[in-house]
Image (cartoon, grey):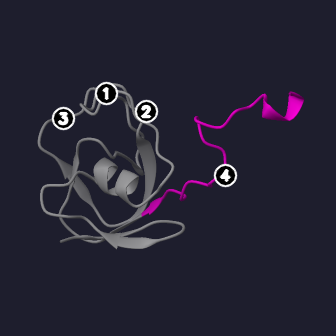
Amino acid sequence: MTLITTDDRVFELRDGESLLEGLERTGHEVEYQCRSGYCGSCRVKIVSGKVAYDEVPLAFISPGEILTCCCRVDEPIRIECKARVETGWSPDDDLFAAYE
């Protein structure tokens, strides 16, 4: 298991889990569209450590950025990513109940 440090938490990736899946599991705010390395939506800044790619991603990434959907994390890393802020609102809430 590999240690991941973010702005808000420290967690370990599970065996076979992508960085994107680990971030989702631990409640982090991370965008994604493709999970295949071609759109770049899941891009985050890496502060320390290194990642590798089994295939070269098609999305443009600047130095100091990684794609969480398709990178392989082989050593502890630190990334800039925040935990999701819970709003207390649910899609099941009745938005118009106060007006009845």
Q: In this orientation, which residue lies closer to the viewer: 53 or 94?
A: 94
Q: Amino acid at mark 3?
A: Val
Task: Compute the Cα span from label 4 to label 1.
Answer: 28 Å
Q: Which residue is mark 3?
A: 56
- Give amino acid for label 1: Cys
Q: Residue at x 53, y 66 (%)?
A: 7
Q: Which residue is mark 2?
A: 41
- x then y, percent, for residue 3: 29, 73
**In what quadrant of the picture does the C terminus appear?**
top right
Mark 1 sits on what residue?
34
Who comes first in sequence, dot 2 or dot 4? 2
In the image, what residue type sits under mark 4? Gly
User: If the image is split into quadrants, where does the N terminus sit?
Assistant: bottom left
**Separation (CA) of disc 3 from disc 4:** 40 Å
Residue bounds of the magenta highlight: 79-100
Q: Give the camera-side residue of 16 and 61.
A: 16
Q: Are marks 2 and 3 in contact (CB under 8 Å)?
A: no
Of the residues tagged 3 and 4, which is closer to the observer? 4
Instruction: Determine whether the residue tagged by mark 2 lies in a helix, strand or loop.
Output: loop
Q: CA distance from mark 2 to mark 4?
A: 26 Å
Left or right: 9, with 96 as reference point: left
Disc 4: which residue: 88
